[in-house]
Each structure stands twice: as structure tokens, then as C-alpha cells.
């Protein structure tokens, strides 16, 4: 099965999470296994998009419920009720092959069917196949994290009265998207670039905010232009 993988790679996903000001729990195996975990014991995002065209979220009950409720409202949520691991993997691969906009939910899938040993304490599994859905899922996770922070109460008893202090989270302004012309001022088409993971490559095109690079070995990758410029993901060599 040949798939045109347009998904963000692990480094880009980490930068997007930082841009959204979502704190990550630093676990020892995170970088080796391409894992982003949200708080200790929180949901865990697996970003193995070099070999696969999917994102996988092992979700807490709270994150699973919010993401499902919002995806149902957007008419993108699909619940898988198959009872065998092989059946689930076949269905997921079919959605993956066409880069579906659907979000697949398996309640207690990790606990009962898939049983990922890296995520023993996270019961539910969510599959999705586009960067737009990644943005949607991260926003849901952030909403839950902020809701938890806002409801953290410091109670000071004064007789029978109780004072409640709420934590207010003030979001920072989002990084503005660069135009293709602004991207090409830093990373021109035809330039030779270096990437920490993929090595040396040539910029084939800059279009619609995306940078397409052909690396040695005929490996083609598509990057988010704004992130590449601001986070220096690509280093231009021949300018």
C-alpha cells in the first residue's frame, strides 16, 4: 500500500504543541518512541508519521469523552465496535489509505483489544489521519487541561464562610502564518537545505504555506512553512 504522507513529523508536532502552550510530561522514552504525553498519567499521542499516515491517541476517559462529543457534533466521529484486533487494524488501514477526515474511536480498545504495553494505564484509543484533526484534538486536550486548572480551588475558611480563588489562564497570541513569499525570503525554491533527521535535500516548491523537500534517497517530505522559518527546522546551505 503506497500512501502520500502529508502529516507533520514528530518535531513539527512538538513545536505545534509548544505553540499552543500545552505542557508535556517528560518521559524517558518519549523521543525514541515519538510520543507526546500530556501531564503525568495524561493522554499520550503517538507520532510515527515517517512510517505511517496516522496519528494515534491513547486517551484518558476525560479526553476521550470531550473529543468524541465534539467530533460527533462535527459529524466526523466513528465508533469501531469490532471484537478482533486484526479486524480493527484492517479498518484503520482503509481509512488511512485515503487520508480520511474521520476520527475513529475505540472505547477500552487499549485495555481490551490492542493492549499497547507502553500505555497500560490509558484505556481508550483514537485514530485520525489529517493535520486538521490533529489541531482539533490538541485544542480539545488543551480545553480539558485549562478546565482542570481553572477549577483548582484554594479554600480559606473564615468561620462558616469559604473564599474560593480560581486560576485564570491567559492565552498568548498565536503565531501568525507567513505567506509563500515571506517563506521564500528565508527558504527559496531550489535551495539546498539540511534537516536534523532527513539530511540534505532540495526545496522543490513553496505553495499554500507548505514546503516540499526532496531528500537524498528520493524521500519527499512536506513541512509547515511558518514552523520551518520560525523554529529553524530547515537550514539553507547554498544561499
Image (cartoon, rainbow, N blue to C red):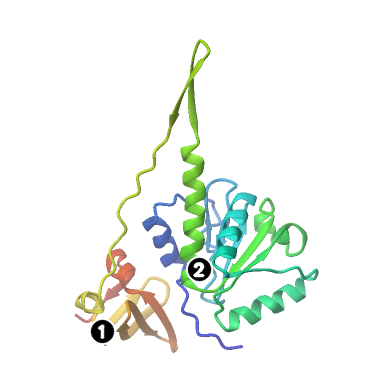
> Within the image, what quadrant is residue 84 found in?
bottom right
Query: In what element is the residue under mark 2?
Result: helix
Q: Is residue 181 visible?
A: yes
> Within the image, what quadrant is residue 94 found in?
bottom right
- How packed is label 1: few (under 14 Cα within 10 Å), some, or many (20 or more)? some
> Within the image, what quadrant is residue 56 found in?
bottom right
11 sits to left or right of 119: left
Q: Is residue 25 visible?
A: no
Which residue in the protein does label 2 denote?
133
Spot the residue most to the top: 159
Q: Nearer the viewer, residue 147 or 6?
A: 147
Residue at figure coordinates x 46%, y 70% from the top left? 132
Image quarter of the C terminus = bottom left
Percent across and percent down for residue 53 are 55, 77
Q: Nearer the viewer, residue 192 or 7?
A: 7
Q: Nearer the viewer, residue 63 or 119?
A: 63
Amino acid at each position: 500500500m503506497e500512501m502520500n504522507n502529508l502529516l507533520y513529523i514528530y518535531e513539527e508536532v512538538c513545536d505545534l504543541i509548544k505553540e499552543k502552550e500545552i505542557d508535556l510530561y517528560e518521559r524517558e522514552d518519549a523521543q525514541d518512541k515519538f510520543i507526546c504525553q500530556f501531564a503525568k498519567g495524561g493522554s499520550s499521542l503517538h507520532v510515527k508519521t515517517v512510517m505511517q499516515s496516522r496519528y494515534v491517541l491513547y486517551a484518558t476517559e476525560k479526553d476521550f469523552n470531550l473529543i468524541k462529543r465534539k467530533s460527533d457534533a462535527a459529524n466526523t466521529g466513528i465508533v469501531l465496535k469490532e471484537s478482533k484486533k486484526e479486524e480493527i487494524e484492517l479498518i484503520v488501514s482503509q481509512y488511512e489509505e485515503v487520508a480520511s477526515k474521520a476520527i475513529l474511536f475505540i472505547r477500552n480498545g487499549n485495555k481490551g483489544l490492542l493492549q499497547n504495553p507502553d500505555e497500560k494505564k490509558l484505556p481508550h484509543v483514537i485514530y485520525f489521519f489529517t493535520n486538521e484533526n490533529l489541531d482539533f484534538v490538541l485544542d480539545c486536550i488543551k480545553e480539558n487541561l485549562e478546565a482542570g486548572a481553572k477549577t483548582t480551588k484554594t479554600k480559606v475558611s473564615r468561620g462558616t464562610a469559604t473564599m474560593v480563588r480560581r486560576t485564570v489562564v491567559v492565552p498568548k497570541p498565536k503565531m501568525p502564518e507567513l505567506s509563500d513569499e515571506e517563506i521564500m525570503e528565508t527558504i527559496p525554491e531550489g535551495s539546498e537545505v539540511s534537516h536534523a533527521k532527513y539530511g540534505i535535500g532540495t526545496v522543490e516548491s513553496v505553495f499554500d504555506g507548505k514546503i516540499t523537500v526532496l531528500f537524498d534517497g528520493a524521500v519527499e517530505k512536506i513541512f509547515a512553512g511558518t514552523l520551518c522559518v520560525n523554529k529553524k527546522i530547515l537550514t539553507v546551505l547554498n544561499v
